[in-house]
Amino acid sequence: MLFPHDSTGSPNISRALASVIQGLALHDACDPPSNRPQYTHYTNEATRIDRIYITAPLTQRKTGITTLIAPFSDHLAVVLRLIYHQQTFLSTNRGWRMNTSLVKDKTFRETLKLQMNNWRRTMHTFPTKTMWWE
């Protein structure tokens, strides 16, 4: 969580998450907080831990965001709607491709390496690697 109002109980504020969001210039896709918080996880308390972060250009393409009930889960699904501009060129390869310009960006590489090292340091606090990853 990033802010105390993201939980009805004792919030677990993540400085690492805040650092990544700031370092990559990401924005919370959720609309600004209203009088009624939008919680996404319910147990004995309610928290807003399921989020979508987007870049500034994508904020201009956002048409809406909502939550839906996810069967067999105590989390709500967060659904982001964006305007899609279809490109007019034909592609022979329809597979996914990574934006390689990120790999060429020294600041991005250094930030990612720093964050991965920080996350790896917490691995020993989890019973399994799978739980650490999630």
Image: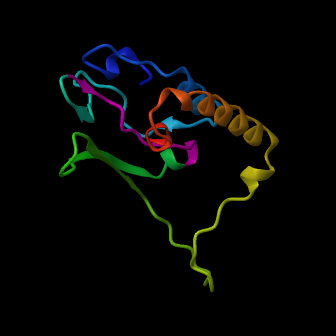
Depicted 121 relative to depicted 83: above or below: above
Q: Position of residue 55 (x, y in %)?
A: 56, 44
- Quadrant of the rendering where the N terminus is positioned: top left
Q: Residue at x 22, y 40 (%)?
A: 74
Whether residue 47 appears in magenta in the rendering, the answer is yes
Q: How many marks?
A: 0
Residue 39 location in percent, x, y?
A: 26, 31
Q: Furthest-front residue in view?
A: 127
Q: Position of residue 17 (x, y in %)?
A: 53, 29
Which segment is the magenta one? 45-57
Q: Foreground residue, 2 or 9?
A: 9
Quadrant for residue 21, please give it: top right
Residue drawn at point x = 18 percent, y = 50 percent? 72
**Does residue 34 appear left or right of residue 20 in this picture?**
left
The residue located at (33%, 22%) in the rendering is 6
**Residue beneath the point at 31% across and 13% down:** 10
Q: Nearer the viewer, residue 102 or 133?
A: 133
Residue 64 image position (x, y, % from top left)? 34, 48
Q: Is residue 19 magenta?
A: no
The picture quadrant where one finds residue 113 is top right
For the residue pair 85 and 12, the one nearer the viewer reads as 12
Quadrant holding the C terminus: top left
